[in-house]
Image (spheres, rainbow, N blue to C red):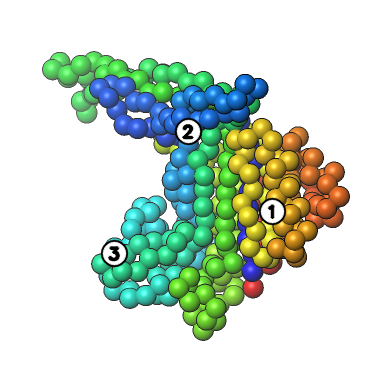
Amino acid sequence: MVYLRITGRAIVNVHSANAEGAVGNYMALSKMFIIRRTGDGYDISEEPVISGNMLKHWHAVNMVDILKSSGYEKICPYCARHVMYRSPDKTKKDEVEFVGGCAIEDVHGFLQPDVQVRRDSLMKFSFMLPVEDAKTEYEAVTHNRVVIEESGKIPAEEQAMMVFKREHASGIYGFLISGDLAYTGRPLADPDNKNKWLPLEERKMRVNAAATALINLLSGRFGAAASRAMPVVKLSEIIIAISRQPIPNLVHGFYYDYAEESAKILEAALGSGLTKELKVYISGEKPSRLVRSEVLSKVVEQFASPMDALTKSAEVIRDWLR
């Protein structure tokens, strides 16, 4: 059994990761209203966000690439082409068949409405939000497209240059990730029937890919317009909690006191017996405060780099899966 909970922050410069479609020649970023605590109460503002759907999609893409590079073949044709679509396969009749046939539908869930079979995603992603203590700024960048003939000349009847504008943003973003990886290779409709489980080594291969894909994702391999606006990402702070028993989510990295509040959740989980086996990997200034907790000091390990913490967590997740 293994349950994964992650929170943290990343500096994200000049990204255009989520857009809402064009109005004329103008492409606007996805924005949402965000409430911040202030000394006088609360403040609300509209700012660029990165959706959980975007992060979930790119996590699945990274998972596919990792599994394919290791020679693993149980990936459905749609997922293998990075088309994370509602499963079109009407030949499978139950969850066990879908889980056995595709690692992505196993970890990221699926819906097949024609045969009335579905599976919740084991991996869950919150929106990445500009943090409570620093707002995000954005501006439109002007681009142009040029139409040319095979010879390289611009046709007389065409515009020489078609100008369009696309918004880009920079800021410090908080994130929150949850993974109930204990259920990898097991039907959620009948999770305790071991006759329906995939072999342990195959389940370990899948959870290892899921954990490793987080390293690629949080290094900046996500978002729209990545071919010309790959997010300039530096992962600055992270808290990773791995438990053999189910535990609550941590506090989203959006909040300025997320590390202290996450520590309280983990202390309560240990103190109440909710979890008996817990490992916590941290990196960064705010998470370093967890080391000073008397309750957590024996289960916390601090790393100089957030990526080292993620790498270590992938090893433990694979080892702990049963």
Q: Earlier in the sequence, mark 2 or mark 1?
A: 2
Residue pictured at 31% horizontal, 31% vertical: 21
Q: Nearer the viewer, residue 109 or 191?
A: 191
Mark 3 or 2, nearer chain start: 2
Residue 77 visible? no
Mark 1 element type? strand
Mark sitting earlier along the chain (3/1): 3
Quarter of the image for residue 118 reads: bottom left
In the displayed structure, does residue 301 sit left or right of residue 142?
Answer: right
The percent position of residue 10, horizontal first and vertical second, equals 61, 35
Give the residue type at disc 2: Val
Label 3 belongs to which residue?
113
Give the residue furthest to the front: 40
Q: Is residue 240 shown to the viewer in this render?
A: yes
Q: Position of residue 272 (x, y in %)?
A: 75, 61
Q: Which residue is mark 1?
A: 241
